[in-house]
Image (spheres, grey):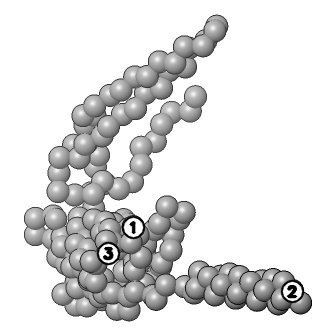
């Protein structure tokens, strides 16, 4: 009988110990929130900062997008998102469209100390003429396999102006 009670006591103690550990492991960590702010600036000489425009806040982790919030910049181009969930390693960026061109802010990464993230958002006036654009680098990669060569070219284009080039180039058929 004593062996039975000892075994029962030991069994119950271990069961409660495992259940307590399992319960402790399933509790989610407290959610941390913070503030994301930004200021729109026009990088084109004489360009204006639009006010009352839609701004979208995005955040990503290693698996994909985690946060997407809609907001509006005030008449001076400032925007603010409050009570935004923050987790270490997430990367935030703000996005807006201006003159049919989409612009992204610089990115801001969440660290353990992060409570506020500032995302400056640079925009430019549009230009339809692409003649100032130059090829600043060209990389040609050759991959050899029996009986064939795969040629890959990578062009790095540079825009030395203070305008966003819009539109396209019509290529001949073929």
Q: Residue furthest right?
A: 1
Q: Nearer the viewer, residue 60 or 120?
A: 60
Q: Residue at x 21, y 43 (%)?
A: 132
Count neighbours of disc 1 (C-alpha within 10 A) and say few if under 14, some if 14 to 19, many if 20 or more: some
**CB atoms of marks 3 and 1 within 8 Å:** no
Left or right relative to 91: residue 116: left
In the rendered image, is residue 125 in sight?
Answer: no
Place of residue 71 in the rendered image (x, y in percent of width and height, measured from the top left): 38, 87
Q: CA distance from mark 1 to mark 2?
A: 52 Å
Q: In the rendered image, which quarter contains the N terminus?
A: bottom right
Q: Which residue is mark 2?
A: 4
Give residue 112's mark.
3
Count neighbours of disc 3 (C-alpha within 10 A) and say few if under 14, some if 14 to 19, many if 20 or more: few
Q: Which residue is mark 1?
A: 89
Q: Residue furthest top?
A: 147
Mark 1 or 2 closer to N-term? 2
Q: Nearer the viewer, residue 110 or 145?
A: 110
Q: Residue at x 17, y 57 (%)?
A: 162
Q: Residue 25 occupies which quadrant of the picture? A: bottom right
Q: In the rendered image, which quarter contains the C terminus?
A: top right
Give residue 124's mark.
none
Mark 2 or 3 closer to N-term? 2
Q: CA distance from mark 3 to mark 1?
A: 9 Å
Q: Residue 158 occupies which quadrant of the picture? A: top left
In the rendered image, is residue 46 in sight?
Answer: yes
């Amino acid at each position: 009988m004593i062996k039975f009670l000892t075994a029962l006591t030991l069994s119950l103690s271990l069961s409660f110990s495992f259940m307590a550990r399992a319960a402790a492991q399933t509790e989610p960590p407290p959610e941390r929130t913070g503030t994301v702010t930004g200021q729109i600036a026009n990088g084109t000489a004489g360009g204006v900062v639009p006010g009352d425009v839609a701004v979208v806040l995005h955040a990503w982790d290693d698996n994909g997008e985690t946060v997407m919030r809609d907001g509006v910049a005030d008449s001076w181009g400032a925007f603010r998102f409050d009570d935004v969930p923050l987790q270490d390693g997430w990367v935030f960026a703000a996005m807006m469209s201006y003159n049919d061109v989409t612009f992204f802010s610089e990115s801001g990464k969440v660290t353990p100390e992060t409570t506020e993230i500032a995302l400056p958002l640079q925009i430019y006036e549009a230009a339809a003429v692409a003649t100032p654009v130059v090829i600043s680098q060209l990389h040609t990669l050759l991959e050899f396999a029996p009986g064939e060569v795969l040629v890959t070219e990578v062009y790095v284009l540079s825009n030395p102006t203070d305008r966003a080039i819009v539109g396209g180039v019509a290529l001949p058929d073929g």
